[in-house]
Each structure stands twice: as C-alpha cells, then as structure tokens.
Amino acid sequence: MYEITQETRRDRRAVGDRPAVVALRAVTRRFGAAAAVDRLSLDVAPGEILALLGPSGSGKTTLLRLIAGFERPDDGEVWIAGRRVAGGGEWVPPEARGVGMVFQDYALFPHLTVAENVEFGLHCVLVAERGPRTAEVLDLVGMRGLAARYPHELSGGEQQRVALARALAPRPFAVLLDEPFSNLDADLRRQVREEVRAILTAAGISAVFVTHDQEEALMLGHRVAVVNAGRLEQVGTPEEIFHAPRTRFVAGFFGRADFLPARVTADGLETEAGLVAQRVAPVASGDGHVELLVRPDDVTIAAAPDGTGTVLERLFAGSEIIYRVALPSGRVLHSRQPHTVELPRGARVAVRVAPGHPLACFQHGAALEVEAAGPPLPRERGEATA
Amino acid sequence: MRVPEARPIVAGRGRAVPLPAFLAVPVLLVSAAVLLPVAYLVVRAAGADEGVLELLLRGRTARVLGNTVLLAAAVTATSVAVAVPLAWLTARTDLPGARTWSVLAALPLVVPSYIGGFMVVTVFGPVGALQRALEPLTGLARLPDLHGFVGAWLTLTLFAYPYVLLSVRAGFRGMDPSLEEASRGLGEGEWTTFRRVTVPLLWPWIQAGALLVALYVLSDFGAVAIMRFESFTTAIYLQYQAALNRSYAAVLSLVLIALAAGVLLAGEQRGRARFHRLGAGAKRPARVVPLGRWRPVAVGFCAAVAALGVAMPVGVLAYWLAIGMQHGDALARVLAPTARSLAASALGAGATLLMALPVAVLAVRHGGALARFTLRVMYVSYALPGLVIALALVFFAARYAPAVYQTLGLLVFAYAVHFLPQAVGPLRSALQQVSPSQEEAARTLGRTAPDVLWTVTLPLVRPGMVAAAALVFLTIMKELPATLLLSPTGFETLATTIWTDANDGRFGRTGFPALVLLAVSSVSMWLLLGQEGGRA
C-alpha cells in the first residue's frame, strides 16, 4: 500500500484546484470484524466520471452506498458539494444529499409509468416545471417517445436509460451507478456504455460508477480507482493505470500478467529467462529481489533442443497463439506468438524476456521507479509484436 | 482541496443505519399491546388473596391439567392415526378417485369446533339422529351419553385431523423418491423401507401437523364446552362467568399459557433439527403403490372418514335448515347478526393490518433484536387461546379502563392482538418480493423514509395487504370465545347467535347462521391453504 498523502498529491494534479463534488476522507466501514472499506480517501472532480474498479467483495459497492447514505461510516468523513454529510457527528440522510443513483437492477417503480418514474424525484419542484423537466431528461436519454410505457414494457437497455433519466431529473450534484451494465448482454452492453458516457458528458455531471469489468472502467472512466480489500490500490487516468500500475495487484488486474522474480545487478535484472537490461531505482530494502511484470508479448520463445523452457499448452486464439511455457523452476510464463509459429506440446524452447520497453517492477507488491539501462536497446521484439 | 483532512471520530463498531423512529415506535407499541394480556394475567395471579402456589396446588388444578393433557394427547394421537394413512393413500397409491378423496378429507377443517360439537351431539347424542334411526331396530330409548371426554375427543379429532393430513401430504410431495429407491437398492424390503426411510423422513411433517392439532385442542373452547368436559378453557370460562374467583381464573390461564408455550417450544426445536434433511428433492414423481386386493378396504376407510367429516356436517346443516324453515325461520333474521359480524370483522381486520404493517416492514427491511422479539412474542400470542386473551382484557379493562370495558374497541383490540401473525405472514412474503433497491432509489430521489413507505412500498405490496386483510377478516367472523366475552351487551354476531341458540337446544335457529359461517370458513381456509402452498 502506498501512502495516502502521496495519493492526495496525485489527486490534486488530476483534479486541479476545483473543489471536489464528492470527497471521502479516510472512510472506514466494518461489517463485524472485517473492514469492507478501510481508511479510504478519494475525490471526484466536477464533471468527472470516476470508475470504481475491483474484484467482487473488494468493497466498491459499499463505497458507493457510503456516498449515497445507505451505509454509515464507522470512521472518516464523507463530503458532498462542500458539505459534510457523514462523520464528525454529522449525518445527512440519503434523501437530503443530492446524489442520484442508478441501481444494478435499475429499481424502476413497476407501478408507475416512465414519466411518473422520472417525475417521482421532482416532488419539491414547482408543479409547472415538472413536466418540462421530465421531458428534458427523457429527451436527453432519447426516451421521450416511451414516456407513457410501464417499466415492464421496456427492454433492458431502455430501462437503463429511464433509470439514468430518473436519477438526473432532480439535478443532483453527482450520480452513482452500481454495476450499471451487468444486466445487459454483451452486444447491448457495448452500445449502452457509449450512450451512457455521452449522456453523462452532455449533462456535465459528476458520476461514480462501480464495475468489475476492466475494459468498461478504462473506456468509460475519466479516471479509474482500483479498489482491493477495502483499500485504494491506485487512482489515475486509464492510461496511467494501464501503463504504470503502481501495485502488483493493479498490474495483475489488467490483462494476462505473469510475475517473474528478478535480482537487481549492475548490468540489469537477472531472471530465470535471462538478463533484462533495465535499471531500477535504488532498492530501499531487502536483498535486491524484485518482481517483473511480464505480459505475453514481452516473452519470445524459439524452438531449441537445449532450451530451458518446456511448452505446456498451446491456446489457439485465432490470429495468434498463446503458449504456456514452464521454466526450470516450474514457473509458468505466457508467450504470444503469431499463428505461423507451430510448437508441439512438450517441445523444448529457449525463453527470453525481450520487451521493447521497460518492464514494471515491483517490490513487496509496490511499484518501483523504472528506467531503461544505458543506451536504448535495439528492437528485439521481432515476431512477438505480430 | 477545501475539504479538511480526516480526523478520527468516535463511532460504534459496524453499526447499521439506525432503526427509523417511524417504525421503531409503532413496533414497540405493538409489542406492548401483544404482551399486555399475558403481563396482566401475571400481575393478577400474583396479587391473589391466597398465594399463587395454594391456588396452583388445588386438587382441581391437577384434575383440569390431567384432563387437558389427556385430551390433547388423545386427539393428537388419533389425528395422526387417521391422517397419515389417508395422506399415504391419496398421495402414493392407485386409490380410485384419489384427488376427490384428498379434497374431501381436508374439508372438515372448515367446520368451527362449536358448530362441529353441536353437530356431533345432534347425530350421536343420547337422543340424537342415530338413536332415532336405530330405535325401530333395537328399541333403545337412549344411546350412551357421549358428553365428556369421548364427545370432545371425537369432535376435535374429526375437525382437527386435517392439519396433520395437509402437513404430511406436503411431506410426501417434497420427498425425494430416490431415497426410498436407494433403500430398496440396498436390499431392504418394501415394509422395512417404509419403516426405516419413509416414516423418519415424514416425521418432521407429522410433528408439524401434530403441533397444530395439540395447540388447537389446548385453545379450543367450543367443543369442550358443548361436551361439558372440564378442560382449562371451560374451567377458566366457568370461573369467569360465575365470578367465583378471578385470580384462580388468571392462575389457570397462566398454566394453560405455559402448556401452549411448552408445546410450541418443543415443536420448534425438533422442527428445526430435522428441517435441513428435507431438501426440495428431485421433482420426479414417486412410484405409485398398487393397492391390489386391499383396494376395497382403502376406499371404505376413506369413505368412512368422509362420511363423518363431510356428509354428517352437510346432513346436519340441511336438517337444521329444514327445521328452521318449518318454524318460519328465514335468512332475513340473520341479517342483523351478519351485519354485526361483518362490521366487527372489518374493524378487526383493519386494526390488525395497521399493527402488522410496521412489524412486517421492520422484520423484512431491518431485522434486528426488536423485530425478532416482536415476531416471537406475536407467535406465542397466536398460540394462546382466544379465551385467555379475552379474559385478560376483561380483567384489565374492568380494573384500569372501565370506559372501554364492553366496547367494540376492546373487542377489536383483542382480535388484532390475537390474529396479528395471520396478517404479518402474507405481508412479509409480499415485502420480500419488493427489491430494497426500489426503496433506496426513492430515497436518493429526495423522499424521506416514511414517504417512501407510502409512495413506493405500500402500492407494491397491495396484493399482500389484501390477502392479509381477507384472511384476518374471515378468521374473525368465526371467532367465538373472545367475541362471547368481549362484545358489548346485545351485540350478537353470527358466532354468538349460533352459540346461544344451540346451547338452548334451538338447533333449528342455527341453520342459517351456520350456513353463512361455513361458507365464510371455506373461503378463509382456501386462502390459508393457498398461502401454505406458496411456502411449501
């Protein structure tokens, strides 16, 4: 785990000096002895779409419910639009927080029509303004034509959009979306995802959404916050998260990732699969043992009778083939090869870690600063980049 | 960042969103209301002039206790003896007309015990229909008097055994036939399999049915009073009516409560231990057992039970109606009592629903100690005889609230306290089907919790509310002892007219009200069974 203060500095860079719409300050929520959310701090900037990404049980939904006011923090504070709504002796109930929510099951009221569902949150608005506002948000989500329908007469994607319109109607400070696309099938999900991003951007509203789908988080979020075991692993732009994972967990969460033990030497990093010419920042502690994040396209293999690797399995994926290769220690690496490379199971191969870029390097689960050693290395990826 | 840094605050560990006051306060009031009768009985008994212990140790108490336990045990045993074979025959064999028999066999449940008691006396009494039919043949001027234990035993068995039947049949339906097949496969014979596999698997269902029968007997007032059998309810009623010793009535009531609570507790513990062994099972029909040459015997058995449980009540009812009409009785006469019954039932159902709602919402949405406590208290109160609840309220009102004594309000209150679980049941099922996220969505749309209950939850559970209200309404229509004790002077309902007229031997006048009540009873039974089917 990295330090919160350091994280806050990073936030400031991303968010700028505008006040946060939603701010969590060292929030903790325990269920029994286990902490579902553990001293977690996070800010959401105006107009920002923040993706909360994590495996199931990581506390991301609890986090959302803490913001909405369905859970009380055991410790820490929740701020919304500059007002403390939980913690420090304050408690503002969900209805007074000005936060809209889209539920996983949409939670549309089955006894009300689409228009009535949207109008439900406008009870504090002048009667004369309710109709126009309802029409406005239904227009925004492209559902005005179906205003008289009942929820059960709508498709899943339509229900999703009505739920979003209903949440936006009272002009909340922010909307929270709990696994908003999990109830849609794959094709529809892709389409609705783009629609939702467009709608949220058009509304100019801050949004926090929970997902366990990394692709969804990267595509939809302006920033992504990776949560694990109730703690924030990393928060940053999708590019930062993907290319510069700051913890081993984050690195492993995106795509196929193998971790290769390495020892820091003067020449670079010595691994079971050869020397990786790369320098790392002075190792703060330990005996110079680190772990390298190795993705399948960083690993080259070539048939060699005296090679140290053994092909375990060959996973055909259309235009490419992923080989599972065992190293002498028994450790398994994945290597992506074009479909023209044909190696039988059991074949002896020479394994080389030959990335065209510095590999992410971790010690005790946290990322180390990396830099390429000496002059740029010649492109070595060859076939591996195909 | 304008938001200040976090600093530790004092907070409880893992606390949930606290109980909203708009639920907690009504539920506390409901708990208090449900506890009131029992609590008052305790106070009353403790304040007796003689010591409670002396009252308890009177020879009469022991006799009443013995009588009651004996009756409950006998009725339960015979109910099981009649119901288990019936259930097996209709569920597992090639019995001709099995469906018809299974409906007929469940029907006696619709006869309230006070009507059933009078029917048994009309037919099997010393100078009843049977004696008149037999007199030309045998010359007997009187049959042996069945008043007392035999009459009570017969009547209660006849009209309560369907509780066991329904339960055991549900057990047969839920049983995985492959378990019996496994036993056969292990080399056990048909009879050994039945004894070593089928019966043990059915045991929880038999127990559940037997529990209901035992509680029914303990709380029954109508049948034992008609048969002039000295059980707790009749003894309590006598003490009350003769105003002999109200403290003694309170003591007797407490012993009866302890008895009911004991039965309930025993049933609960065993029921739980066995429940998980009965999975839903494979939904494959069980093998049909061919009856072969036993077929006529089986049909004869079913026919005999149906003759006593269905043909006899129908015949007696027709007979009463005929006599009544000969004497110029008409349906019009029962209009006023019917109207009163309807009014009392409607008020009672409304009050019950009102009390049930916060309890159900709390139990389903929040859980917690208060909800558990209230549900427990409520079910114990349901097992209490209506007579005991009514008596406690009579005592209480006479001493502390004379203004409500003998008012409709107190009667309605007694109904609500007694029948609360009947309303909470369907309401809970309905609430469980409403996703909590709908209520949470309403909260994020700016509605307060009470507002959400009103605009979202209640409209969504309306069908459950209607079912609950209907069930309570129909149950109150048939209720006798509380109505007898608590109705305002001159407030004759269908149940009390039947009671008074039949007690005075004017059976002809009971035809029309009994007809109406049996109809009502059939509807409520149908509703109740529909619910149980949903649970099974």
Image (spheres, rainbow, N blue to C red):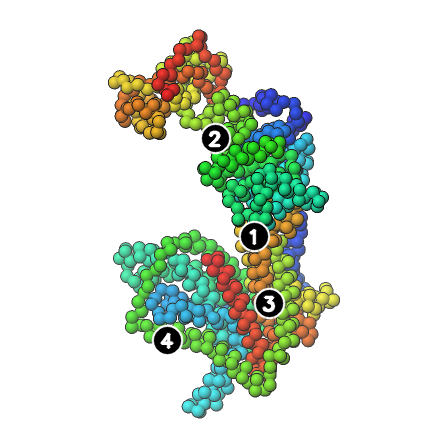
Q: Residue furthest front?
A: A145
Q: Is residue B326 above or below residue B253?
A: below
The disc at residue B534 is none
Q: Quadrant of residue A13?
A: top right
Query: What's under tag 1, amino acid-wise?
Result: Leu
Q: Nearer the viewer, mark 2 or mark 1?
A: 2
Residue at which label 4 appears: B300
Q: Residue furthest top?
A: A375
Q: Earlier in the sequence, mark 1 or mark 3?
A: 1
Q: Nearer the viewer, mark 1 or mark 4?
A: 1
Q: Give the CA distance from mark 1 to mark 4.
A: 46 Å
Host chain of mark 1:
B
Q: Give the CA distance from mark 3 to mark 4.
A: 36 Å
Crowding at label 2, few (<14), some or many (≥20) Cα neighbours within 10 Å?
Answer: few
Host chain of mark 3:
B
Query: What's under tag 2, amino acid-wise?
Result: Glu
Residue at which label 1 appears: B431
Residue plotted at (67% across, 44% down): A130
Is there one chain holding both mark 3 and mark 4?
yes
Residue at which label 2 appears: A215
Task: Answer yes or no: is residue A94 visible.
Answer: no
Residue B76 placement (x, y as % from top left): 46, 68
Residue plotted at (43% across, 21% down): A293
Residue A214 placement (x, y as % from top left): 48, 30
Q: Give the CA distance from mark 2 to mark 3.
A: 61 Å
Residue at which label 3 appears: B476
- Element type at marker 4? helix
Q: Is residue A111 above or below residue A21?
A: below
Residue plotted at (58% across, 73% down): B234
Q: Would residue A84 be found to the left or right of residue B313 on screen?
A: right
